[in-house]
Amino acid sequence: MKYDEGTNKAKQLVNQPTDNHTGDTLAALTLAEKVHLCHAATLFSVCGIARLGIPDMVMSDGPHGVREELADDDWAPRGDVDDSCSYLPTGTALAATWNSDMAKRHGMVLGAEARERGKDVILGPGINIIRTPLCGRNFEYYSEDPYLVAVLVGEEVRGIQSQGVAACAKHFACNSQELNRFAVDALPSERALREIYLPGFKAAVDAGLLTIMGAYNRLRGQWCCQNDYLLNQVLKTEWGFAGLVVSDWGGVHNNCFEPALYGLDIEMGTHRPFDEYFLAGDFLKALENGEIDEAVVDDTCRRYLFVMERIGAMGDGAAARPAGERNTAHHQAECRAIADEAMVLLKNDGLLPLDKTGISSLLVIGSNAMCRHAGGGGSAGVKPHYEITPLEGLQQYLSDAVRVEYCPDPMPADGSPIPNHLLSTADQSSGVKGWVRKRYDRHDVGGEVVEETAVTEVDLDWNEKLPDGVADAHEWSLRYVTTLTPEKSGTYTFVLRGNRDAGLNVNGSILLKRRDEDGAPDTACSKIELIAGKPYELVVRVAPNETGSSKHVKLTWLTPDDATATSLAELREKARQADVVIYVGGLSHLEEIEGRDRKTYRLPGLQDEVIAALADANPNLVIMMTGGSPYAMPWVDQVPAILHMGYAGMEAGAVAARILFGEVNPSGKLPFTFPIKLEDSSAHCLDDYQRDVCYYKEDIFVGYRWFDQRDIAPLFCFGHGLSYTSFDYRDLEIATDGEGIATISCRVTNTGLMTGAEVVQLYLHDCECSVRRPPQELKGFRKVYLDPGESTSVTFILRESDLAFFHPTRREWVAEEGDFEVRVNASSRDNRLTGVFSFSRPSGESRPL
Ligand code: BGC
């Protein structure tokens, strides 16, 4: 690609003050040294310039713990014994606290642990807006609402950076699905971008964010890591971001010009030798021959020095830089405190809290009762110091007072996908573990490999799309290859389902084969003894077949634990005899993982059938669910109590037990809407959840804005969450003569018998406006802690910017005069107090903000 002089000037150079020191350092750097600061030197670091005292910049994932150490040039774990960390509640769990103080404390723990592990940058928080319930990374993100994201992210960034570590908000921007994440083009309107998808990032920048990560996807045709509009025009020029833009790992494409000129500073994770990165040798050449102006690289160097200076990594600052701490009792207490507020009581017909004196036998059912989640999910996975499961939490809490019996879920006959953390093949551009899929140009052996792709499981669906360049499915064959290291010795059953010729080899020997006779789907299974800790090479071969238009192949397995699973009939019988039954289900990182979206809104396995059967057998049934996204609950009316636990970190099990028995009063509120069915949510209703291009057809009507606008009843609405006590709201007052445009206050009283916390939520409705606006938008929230009978006054100050919308044609923020309705709510749909105020300017003119 050729760049003319005009394009060469594309990079907007922010006028950062160049102090004498920075100026001297810049002058002393050779061009080659400057280029060194623009790309990775190992998988997670940039090499500094030792002769000038410029330190290396060491990064780590993020976002809810410091990732284990990986090899320098490979995604394989280094196998260190001292790289465990605290596993904090993940994004949506943190957001469910609706508590900015918790976000700050979350950030402080993360920052201090990163610091103790010698990191300069922690790759988090992840703050993409939740647009579809299916997105595999929702659990890492915060919410569907930009205001909630903005308030929390500011505090999280401050918390992290108070520890001498740079935060890295990601993924900028519109990374709202994992489906075809390396290429999908997001085409939101300017208004949707400004009102929904960007405010979180803007708030992070306003809080002093030092680094930001570009997203993998495209925005309006340009990849986000080399996107002139996003990086140069909005982030660096309009918002004045003075820190570094870091690419997502492997997010840089085709040449050095676009990344260098369209706003990227540091290239990471490209699948090439480090000195062949786009911003390495090619960049140096382009600078040397004048195709790119030296001011471009100087700008990145200035930013590098600025970030290192700010975190105290340079010169004199280093002495005062916090040393950090890790796995301390204080951090464990912080994880517990955040988790206490992160769980959302969705339903309670009076069964909860349980009274342990009235119970002699407790039956706990479901695989999530025993499952540890910290290591899963892709790049966000951590090696925790410990993780208390719900079953352990209950056992520890009840000790010998109550007999606790555990039964796993009955297994579907075809098992479940092989967990990614047991596979050691990693995607070279992202480190996500799974399989390498090799496509051959001929039927089976002897052909050439024409394409290699990283995939997270063997689950082929040719209804979706043939590989690029392939007109006819007969022209090709596939092999999936990985190395599996089981954690447990025993008999495993591999299950291959589909309607094509396929087979599985283990360590070179054929374990199973299925022949396609008539294009009809069927299943082949075979058992094998595997030894814990021993690596096994698995190869799945898939050949083209002659018949059938839809073509599927899927590999799953049954583990030794699944073999002992109780049948549904046995479970029902056991449930009948127990005093109380606790079902622990929901999602896990088998479904919620980087690199792929969930395929269905349904709960995995036989959960729906099991819950319905248990509800039939025993009225004292508590449902406890893990998950970072919403999921369907066809049995919702049949069960008396549902606790959404999220992924609440390493103390989750202990906290859940204390909530069930009333030692902690739940105070979490949903940061996203639970639709009744998938088609109720905007992207799916509008058929705009697509592989190649998403038009963001719902525009600004995302999340509850969509449900409100279309008057769709949610299963549980945004902001919903119950308590064991009750709160009364009264005495709404609106003053328009104070600070800001309006001061809204009311009195909230704990009218129940238990100490508890309530999140008072302020929504605003613009009564009349020249453009369509959502029926209501969150504009404030306060969490109050009250003893029984205690009351407090809650005050919100609305400013002109709170009334504004992004004008689609004027392309600026505008607050129009007129009436605004204020709703003080306990959830987006639980309105307690309403009032109206009128906004006018003395001049009578609307003006941009
Ligand atoms: C993810 C990032 C992560 C990076 C480094 C990428 O695949 O999208 O969120 O920080 O890998 O592990």
Image (cartoon, rainbow, N blue to C red):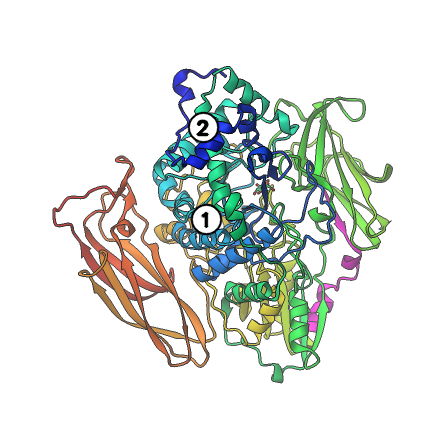
Distance of label 2 from label 1 (alpha carbons):
34 Å
Q: Is residue 610 above or below residue 72?
A: below
Q: Is residue 530 above or below residue 789?
A: above
Percent x, y of residue 432? 65, 42
The residue drawn where x is 65% and y is 72% is 394
Percent x, y of residue 367? 68, 61
Q: Quadrant of ligand 1?
A: top right
Q: Residues within 10 Å of mark 2 (few under 14, many from 20)?
A: many
Q: In the image, which residues are magenta?
A: 553-575
Using residue 831 as the reference point, say whether residue 504 is left or right of it: right
Percent x, y of residue 829? 37, 61
The residue drawn where x is 77% and y is 46% is 495
Local secondary structure at mark 2: loop
Kindly identify the amino acid type of the residue bearing the numbered disc 1. Ser
Q: Which one is earlier in the sequence, the residue at label 2 or at label 1?
A: 2
Reading the image, the residue beneath label 1 is 681
Reading the image, the residue beneath label 2 is 262
State the residue in front, 133 or 25.
25
State the residue in front, 481 or 658.
658
The residue drawn where x is 22% and y is 59% is 739
Determine if the magenta segment contains residue 564.
Answer: yes
Local secondary structure at mark 1: loop
Residue 141 visible, this angle: yes
Kindly identify the amino acid type of the residue bearing the numbered disc 2. Tyr
